[in-house]
Amino acid sequence: MELKKYQRRVLDCVRDYARLVDSANGNGREAYEEYLNRRDLHIGEGQVRSYSADLGTVPKVCVKVPTGGGKTFIAANTLKVLDDNLPPVQARAVVWLVPRKEILRQTIRQLRDPANYLRIAIDRDFSHRVEVLDKEQGLAGRGLDVSSVNDQLTIFVLSYDSFKNKEGRKAYQENSALMQLTNYQKASGMAVDVEGADDTALISALSGLNPIVVVDESHHAKSDLSLGMLRNLNPRFVLELTATPSSKSNVIARVSALELKKEQMVKLPVIVYRRDGKREVVEDAILLQRRLELIAGREREKTGRYIRPIVLFQAERRGADDAETFRKLKEKIVNAGIPDEQIAIRTGNVDELKDVDLMSEECPIRFIITVEALSEGWDCPFAYVLATVANKQSKTNVEQIVGRVLRQPYAVRAKTRALNVSYVLTSSADFNETIDQVVAGLNGAGFSKNDVVASQTAEESNDVRHIQDELADTHDGDSEADAGHEHDDLNGMVFTDVASSLPETDTEINEPAGRVDQIIAESTKAEEDFEQQVEETGDHAFDEEDSGLGEEDAMRYSIRNAVEESVKGLRLPRFMIRQQSSGSNLFAELDDGDAAELDSASLLENFHAGKCPTQGIHFSPQAIRDAKQIDVDGDSHVRVKWMSTDQMAMTRALFAKDATDNKRKTIRDGLLNETRIQERKLYGDGELRRLLRNVVEDMDDEQLNDAYDNLGAYARIVSDEVDRQAAKFKRDEFNRLRDTGTVYLDPCYELPASFTLRKPFDSLPNSLYEAEEDGMNNLERDMADMLANTDGILWWHRVTEKRHGEFSINGFINHYPDFLAMTRQGKILAIETKGEMLKNDDSRDKLELGNIWANAAGGAYRYFMVFAHDPLEGTGAYAIDEFRQILGQIG
């Protein structure tokens, strides 16, 4: 199993910190501060919390990895990194701590299995000289003699409770089996006195080894007893791994959910569906499992990978009646026609999954009934569906187990999108509560609410909507009268033979009909949208000095107390659009049932790319070179070059065998495939096909042949022309709708009480917030300095483009001015700065829209565009020296 890109980055961070520990003579605090300094992160400046030295100078740091990110694999690979870079010791020992017995058994099994990817990585790094011991072997002294600990890597896998409870006291008692090792430690100066322990005890022997300590799921190990255990182990280094670091964790590396999605580690987004009652939840879960299994069968024909989708049924917690509740549910599922052997129960008292290999093709289990027992360490990527079957009025806690359906089988994205997402079915009357629970569960797994998609019942909505901050605005439409419905009672719940209606083939999968088919269709759309979001975000370009720290470590900065009164009740105007009486509504979700804030994309509702004239599309074959060759040159370096004339002629000869009509079809299809995904989503594939048909029909033979070699370049030319015509259409539509009163200005934007800053900047006075976002260029810094030191300016704020909650002037474009400012007389200034290289159509569009906005807003608002030197002629823009004089007169 190869390391993913983000896993290699984490190892680099651990290596860097370990080397600094070596340079600091083992002082963890000094190494941590230097580690942050090298990344331009500083303690005490609102960026990173100070080092938590609960183990004194012992280096104790944390790596944050969301659920499904391979924390255990990262830990296995860090052992060699730490051993090579920390100050050397005589014996090489690791204490690997886990929170519960289930994870203990699993970790020991994996680390002892020569064929397991964890053991393979460790054997590779330590030349197969590795011994894995548990507590009982340690107490018996097996593998704990002088030669063993000096000649190999010894890994002790222990639970957090190994030294805590009454049974754990054995580790503190005299132990003759360890006398040889402990006597050697005394003679060589390695022995450490452990309070309350005999000097031959297991804890004393471990302490004398000065081990590296790996703390898995470290958020469970924050009690005083846990810290005391760590101190008694006398570690030379403590590495914590968790999805949710505590406030006392010294985080040196973070992995984002996006990175996991990019590396095909998790099934995201999670799609949440509300059903009318408990019976519908169970029926749909059974049908959805069957549908997904049929899809998985078709997938296997293409890839050879076996997937058996599993449903987790979460039964309702009812105190002493738990057993009756989940056994009743199993009885109902069996009555629905599901074979008994396909159902297993896993609760606090019943474990029918013990020693079961759920990944085996021989395993029949497709349904697992639980309450809340499945948590960290339950590791089956085949889990796809979480179905909660609590009564409508019950508060179902899905938070603890939603992370169990996130892992992607084989860490490879499936070709069928429905196998790349996770599903949650609920009948809760409070749909918001369930959404909040799922979000909280994802937070607990290291993800965020942006990884959730919600859908109401099939009858209520056909669209799939990402959950934003307005979760509280989602309505379920149920009445209290529904609570007593007979199909919402476990005792009264009666199924038809669901199994008899299970589909036998997958032939109708592309023709959705019915509730479950709609789930598949919506999941496909949601996964496609999520994938596009991932692509548009771009790669996380972490360099060797980047730990991934920053966004989650940034702090929030509030509006300053001195200017708080000036913004109370202040609402900045934005353009609104009234709901259209006909046609599809492409506008944002309506705030008052009548109008919504205008988004420039909504102005394209009546734009048809297929009708764009082609006269403005010009191809110059001699100027386009998209065909490339990748080869190895004489010095064994891989090079990317233009194709030679002979090579292009050869490929054209192959192409020339096609009839002319086939050529044109091939090029049409190729141009569409090469069109940027945002254009395809914005304009629609159908419209673009119609346009490309016209474009290709107009091509002469030379252009046809050249287009075959340069599809990407030709597609960009077409897209650029469509974008140009779409921009003109938006401008015209914006003006038309303003003339009719459909688009109008309304004071609706409220400045947020606080912002999270990645690079806080607080060295200039009179800012609106306690700090503003840095990363400014020279002209922006000059403007900030001018605003901060002008007597007539009460406050100033630097606008960060496209930050959630930030102000923009919305019109035929969405324009984020660089600065907002308020004068002492209460006027609001919106200011855009432009370098000399930006005297272009974009600048003209922003200036035009800014002036429209200010004129419509009234005398209390002004808009300025400011250049470093020479402004755009005849536009009303200013050079910065001219603006300085105007600023002093505005007041």
Image: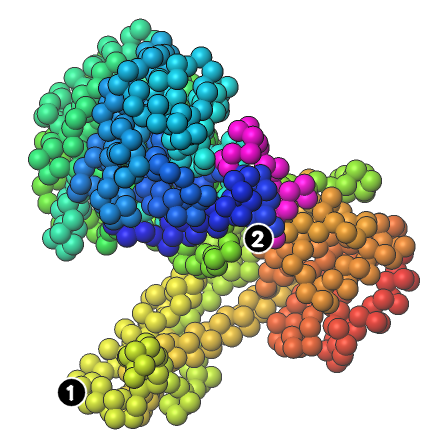
Q: Is residue 761 above or below residue 854?
A: above
Q: Residue at x 19, y 28 (%)?
A: 367
The magenta segment is 39-60
- The answer to whether any part of residue 396 appears in the image is no
Q: Which residue is mark 2?
A: 39
Between 54 and 246, the one nearer to me in the picture: 54
Residue that protrudes farthest toward the top in the picture: 320
Q: Residues within 10 Å of mark 1 (few under 14, many from 20)?
A: few
Q: Give the SS element for disc 2.
A: loop
Q: Nearer the viewer, mark 1 or mark 2?
A: 2
Coordinates of residue 803 in the picture (x, y in percent)? 59, 52
Coordinates of residue 707 in the picture (x, y in percent)? 32, 84
Q: Is residue 220 above or below residue 615?
A: above
Q: Which residue is mark 1?
A: 657
55 inside magenta stretch: yes
Colour approach in the figure? rainbow
Q: Residue at x 35, y 27 (%)?
A: 184
Between 203 and 678, the one nearer to me in the picture: 203
46 inside magenta stretch: yes
Quadrant housing residue 221: top left
Amino acid type at circle 1 is Lys
Q: Residue at x 59, y 68 (%)?
A: 731
Q: Residues within 10 Å of mark 2 (few under 14, many from 20)?
A: few
Q: Residue at x 29, y 84 (%)?
A: 634
How far apart are the alpha carbons under marks 1 and 2? 58 Å
Coordinates of residue 880 in the picture (x, y in percent)? 80, 70
Coordinates of residue 779 in the picture (x, y in percent)? 73, 67
Amino acid type at circle 2 is Arg
